[in-house]
Image (tube, rainbow, N blue to C red):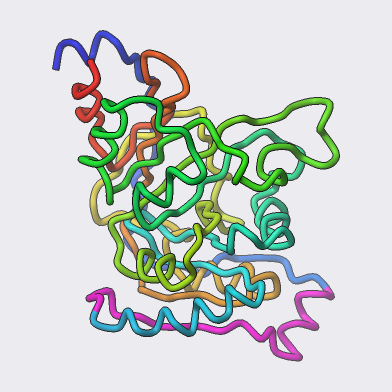
Amino acid sequence: SSSSSSSYALTVKSTKLQVPVCRKPIRTSTPTMMAATAQGTGLETIRVDGTYNDTWKMKQVADMIRTGALGVIPTDTSYAYVCALSNRKGITRIYDLKHLSGTRKPMSLMCLDLSMAQQYTLLQNKALFKMMKDALPGPYTFILPSTNEVPRVLLEHKLHKKTWKRREVGIRIPDNEYCLELVRLLGEPLLVSTAVTDEDDVDDEDEIIPVPVPHAFSPSNCAASISETWASQLDFVVDSGPLPLEKSTVINCTVIPYEVIREGKGSIDILDMVD
């Protein structure tokens, strides 16, 4: 609409069309990696068919996460690293995998519903609540003020406390039954961050990236590529096959008017609800 286009200025970064194949990345082996390959990495692979007739397999995944496991699961946009929100070591491992140690880059909480999200964030008004209720489950990340329930390790880095502190957190409620069943079984949010391989650039939340063609794929959307790259650093992978190359739409709800940080799969027309 005219109101939304005047309120939200979007910058689009050009991207190259990617060939729809699932490729394994070329990676130089280190002694540690070769030893892990020789001895067996212990990486657990749980294959699902994407029809949601096998959501019962999430019980095995939930059991691993309860014991402190870090792994990769499919979402409604791409594959993502996940661990339990209460797993401080797992949170640090995700930071290390994404090369985010010491940065102020936000991560998100994957919740079952808005009731769970409200335990960790401040939904400031009825209009915001209604917008999120209509948009979720869906391919959105809403950045909201955090409550004291969010672990401090997410809000300040132990080596950089004097440099920055964060007072907000992203909320994801994906339209994916594997994700929702997993959170339901755990009874707590998952910390979630987009999975990458050596062939991918680390996600830049400050740039708005256009949605590519529906059937384009990248290494980070192929479980086999992720397993190949990070086998020695992950505990499990839920493999749903190649996924379309898509990202969630990120909306910062801590400022007025709300700010589109990244335009992705989710339509920004939902902002018309709060104009």
Quick one: 132 or 148, which is closer to the camera? 148
Say whether residue 113 is left or right of residue 88. left
Q: Position of residue 125 (x, y in %)?
A: 34, 25
Left or right for 109, reference 166: left
Estimate the x, y position of residue 10 in percent, counting from the top left. Answer: 35, 19
**Residue drawn at (62%, 68%) of the image:** 70
Of 110 and 226, nearer the camera is 110
Q: Which residues are magenta?
A: 31-52
Residue in the picture at 61% in, 30% down: 167
* Quarter of the image where the C terminus is located: top left
Q: Quadrant of residue 25?
A: bottom right
Q: Which residue is most to the top?
A: 6
Coordinates of residue 28 in the picture (x, y in percent): 72, 66
Please state the total of marks drawn on the protein image.
Answer: 0
- Residue 159 falls in image quadrant: top right
Residue 8 lies, with reference to residue 133, above or below; the image says above
| 77 shown above or below 64 | above
Is residue 13 visible in this depiction of the protein?
Answer: no
- Residue 231: x percent and y percent? 64, 75
Which image quadrant: the N terminus? Answer: top left
Q: Is residue 95 above or below residue 13?
A: below
Which residue is nearer to you in this view: 230 or 267?
267
Task: Give left or right: position of 258 versus 266.
Answer: right
